[in-house]
Image (spheres, helix red, strand yellow):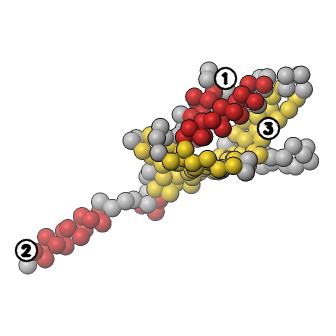
């Protein structure tokens, strides 16, 4: 009988200590995670901060695999990803005058206490070096995992809006990301 009780307690403990899912989380817990991810991303994409490449790279783990798909290219390591972000900043970003990163929508699904996915749309109005108005825009999906107490992007996909001015983006009429 004693072994039966101990065995039953071991089984209950195993399930009680198992990984939690979103179904086990309160709405307040999910909202807190979603809000913290939104703040993290908005801060990293603040183009008024010095060293934008460093700021953007702060979203990714220092080591291990990072999958990023953008412009028909897939990278699988942090150095490859940093090379791509650095190339974007060198050839596009630093040529933008008065850029302002605007998040037009941010949708977060919390999958577990340590996993979430965010799909967002953005636009970056700016002036070209010749003083012309220009906007780059697109959609971005990022998978976040909490590691060592920090949220990090482990997979992402970016797609640019084409240069066609007749195309419309989701501009979120409420104005809230």
Residue 173 lies, in percent from the top left, at 77, 45
Q: CA distance from mark 1 to mark 3?
A: 17 Å
- Find residue 163 and report its image quarter: top right
Q: Is residue 102 above or below residue 1?
A: above
Disc 2: which residue: 2
Quick one: SS at disc 1?
A: loop
Farthest residue in the bottom direction? 1
Q: Which residue is mark 3?
A: 136
> Between marks 1 and 2, how big is the CA–CA gap?
66 Å
Q: Which residue is mark 1?
A: 48
- Measuring 40% from the left and 41% from the top, which residue is drawn there? 149
Q: In the rendered structure, which disc, 3 or 2, sits on the residue that comes first in sequence? A: 2
State which quadrant residue 82 falls in.
Answer: top right
Q: Return the x and y of residue 2 as percentages of the image width and height.
A: 7, 74
Q: Residue at x 90, y 26 (%)?
A: 132
Asked if residue 117 is positioned above or below residue 53 in the image, the reply reads below
Which is in the foreground here, disc 3 or disc 2? 3
Figure quadrant of the C terminus: top right
- Element on which disc 2 rests: helix
CB-based contact (under 8 Å), mark 3 and mark 2: no
Whether residue 29 is visible here, answered yes or no, is: no
Q: Distance of mark 3 from mark 2, alpha carbons?
A: 68 Å
Q: Residue at x 60, y 40 (%)?
A: 81
Secondary element at tag 3: strand
Q: Which mark is residue 9?
A: none
Q: How many residues crowd around disc 3 within 10 Å: few (fewer than 14), some, or many (20 or more)? A: some
For residue 22, side relative to residue 6 (left or right): right
Of residues 54 and 32, the one nearer the viewer is 54
């Amino acid at each position: 009988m004693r072994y039966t009780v101990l065995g039953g307690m071991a089984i209950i403990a195993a399930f009680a200590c198992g990984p939690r899912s979103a179904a086990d989380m309160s709405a307040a817990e999910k909202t807190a995670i979603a809000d913290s991810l939104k703040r993290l991303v908005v801060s990293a994409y603040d183009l008024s901060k010095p060293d934008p490449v460093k700021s953007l790279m702060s979203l990714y783990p220092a080591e291990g695999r990072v999958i990023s798909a953008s412009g028909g290219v897939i990278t699988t390591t942090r150095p490859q990803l940093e090379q791509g972000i650095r190339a974007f900043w060198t050839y596009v970003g630093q040529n933008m005058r008065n850029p302002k990163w605007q998040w037009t929508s941010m949708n977060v699904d919390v999958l577990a206490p340590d996993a979430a996915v965010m799909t967002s749309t953005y636009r970056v109005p700016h002036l070209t070096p010749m003083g012309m108005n220009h906007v780059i825009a697109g959609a971005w999906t990022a998978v976040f995992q909490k590691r060592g107490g920090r949220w990090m992007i482990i997979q992402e996909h970016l797609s640019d809006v084409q240069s066609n001015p007749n195309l419309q983006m989701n501009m979120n009429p409420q104005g809230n990301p």
